[in-house]
Image (tube, helix red, strand yellow):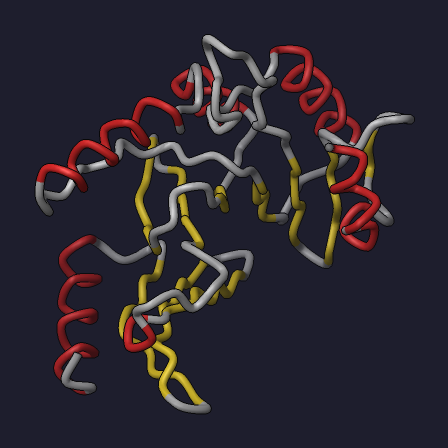
Amino acid sequence: MVKQFGDYYFETFSGTNKNDGSYFPFVKELNDIQFIGLNSIARFSKVKNPFGSNGKIHDNELIETATLLRKIPSENKKRIVLVHHHFNKIKLQKNGFASDFWQKIEKQTMKLKKKKRIIAFFKEHNIDIVLHGHWHSNLEYSRDQIRFFNAGATIKGNFIDELQVNFINTSPDNTIMETHKLVANSSIIIHRNSFQDGIESVKEETDRLKKAVNY
């Protein structure tokens, strides 16, 4: 499956620093950004991973990643990790018995093992941002001063009025994330967060933007 993924998205892996004969881990430099790709897909198991949806980043992959990063200077560069599984705790919503029951099943079958160890690895190697998916919700959160962004889903679904997309602008001094609400053939900014801003200023800016578009 990894080979099929790599062959299909071959342009992602072109020009990357990686070990011969493997797709992950990799480091790809674009201008002042270092993208670090990790494979968090755990092997299928009838007992431990019956749906193939739980995640794990093996120790040898982290060791290989550390070796790659030591070879590549990171001065004045942002380091952004690309990985599938989420790092936040999933909050269950009260939407009735059937929904609650299904969410509990999802919570137990979509876990990433040893998250604290992985986050400590990110901290040690000066990771600035982690971009992930897996949980189909547009989220932004932090762990140990590292910013995490969940892109949400890639299809329209049934909630056309709630379509959102994140834009991340980086510079050596700052990183700004904007959430755009898609409206007709354009978009409206409903959330803006500078990584140098405090939580209160972010909340005030978000509230102002929501009022401006009657969100």
Q: Quadrant of residue 192?
A: bottom left
Q: Most extreme residue toward the right, as rendered?
A: 20
> At which x and y percent is residue 170?
52, 61
Q: How many marks?
A: 0
Q: Residue at x 73, y 30 (%)?
A: 24
Vertically, is 20 above or below 91?
above
Please indicate, yes or no, whether residue 194 appears anywhere in the rendered image: yes
Q: Residue at x 27, y 58 (%)?
A: 197
Q: Residue at x 82, y 37 (%)?
A: 17
Vertically, is 206 above or below 89?
below
Horizontal arrangement in the rendering, residue 100 relative to residue 190 (left or right): left
Please tell me which residue lies in front, 24 or 42. 42
Q: Residue at x 36, y 68 (%)?
A: 179
Considering the image in quadrants, where does the N terminus appear?
top right
> At which x and y percent is residue 193?
31, 62
Please tell me which residue lies in front, 189 or 69. 189
Please indicate, yes or no, whether residue 129 appears anywhere in the rendered image: no
Q: Quadrant of residue 161?
A: bottom left
Vertically, is 180 above or below 8?
below
Q: Most extreme residue toward the bottom, as rendered?
A: 185
Q: Quadrant of residue 101?
A: top left
Vertically, is 28 above or below 195?
above
Please tell me which residue lies in front, 90 or 106. 106
Horizontal arrangement in the rendering, residue 211 relative to residue 120 (left or right): left
> At which x and y percent is residue 126?
53, 33
Q: Most extreme residue toward the front, as rendered?
A: 98
Horizontal arrangement in the rendering, residue 39 relative to residue 208 (left or right): right
> At which x and y percent is residue 20?
91, 26
Considering the image in quadrants, where does the C terminus appear?
bottom left
